[in-house]
Image: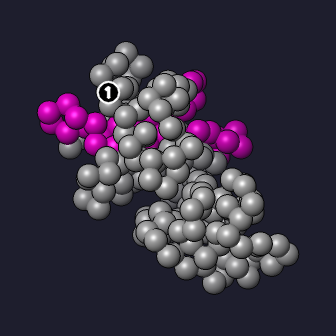
Amino acid sequence: MRIEDLRPDDESAIRQVAALLVAGFAEHWPGSWPDLERALAEVRKSFDPGRISRVAMEDDGTAAGWVGAIPLYHGRVWELHPLVVDPARQGCGIGRALVADIEAQVRACGGLTITLGTDDVDDMTTLSGTNLFPSILDHLARIRNLRRHPYEFYQKCGFVIIGAMPDANGLGKPDILMAKSVAR
């Protein structure tokens, strides 16, 4: 497997990555990219100026995963968006490799911090289905992963929870905010 830039002229890879978005988010985040058309639009948006778009490719030309990053705060902070791994290949190190690669890319661009949001729309953590106000920090201090929510994957990659946006996806459906320093 190699990780390389996803190129705007590689229509085969673009279509494979879009299909990964649909498949990878279908179970827990079906509204994110419910069809190939919306997923293709997201992939093509990753080619906007200043953004980073990287793909994990198998030797046979099959896309195994994709990660993107968007500059914020004059390039000092970057949002990791999105990250997807072929559901059949999750747990094989592809996601970790993509995160490590995007960290190196962001660092090379002068970035100091990477941030991300990881939604809980279907009761995967103890933050879901709960009124987080007024004690958001208390809820975050007691967060538990109930059904393989990806926040623990990101913690294993060195990210920390820096907050939550209550009701970001509807009543009782928060976005868990995370960040990691990539400064040397």
Q: Position of residue 112 (x, y in %)?
A: 59, 52
Viewed as shown, does residue 3 lie left or right of 145? left
Q: Position of residue 44 (x, y in %)?
A: 49, 24
Helix or strand or loop: what does disc 1 sit on?
A: helix
Q: Is residue 61 above or below residue 137?
A: above
Q: Is residue 75 magenta-colored? A: yes
84 falls in the magenta region: no
46 lies above or below 90: above
**Of residues 157 and 24, the one drawn nearer to the viewer in this rendering:** 24
Residue 175 x, y percent position in the rendering: 65, 59
For the point 72% across and 55% down, which residue is it?
170
Q: Specify few, some or many for label 1: CA neighbours under 10 Å numbering under 14, 14-19, or 20 or more.
A: some
**At x 28% / y 42%, what residue is drawn?**
64
Q: Quadrant of residue 8?
A: top left
Q: How many marks?
A: 1
Q: Nearer the viewer, residue 175 or 99?
A: 175
| Amino acid at pointer 1 | Ala
The N terminus sits in image quarter: top left
Residue 142 found in image quarter: bottom right
Q: Residue furthest right?
A: 134
- Residue at 43% of width from left, 40% of height from top? 21
Q: Which residues are magenta?
A: 47-76
Name the image quarter holding residue 116.
Answer: bottom right
Asked whether the viewer can see residue 106, the reply is no
Q: Is residue 165 above or below residue 52?
A: below
Asked if one can make out residue 39 in the rendered structure from this viewpoint, the answer is yes
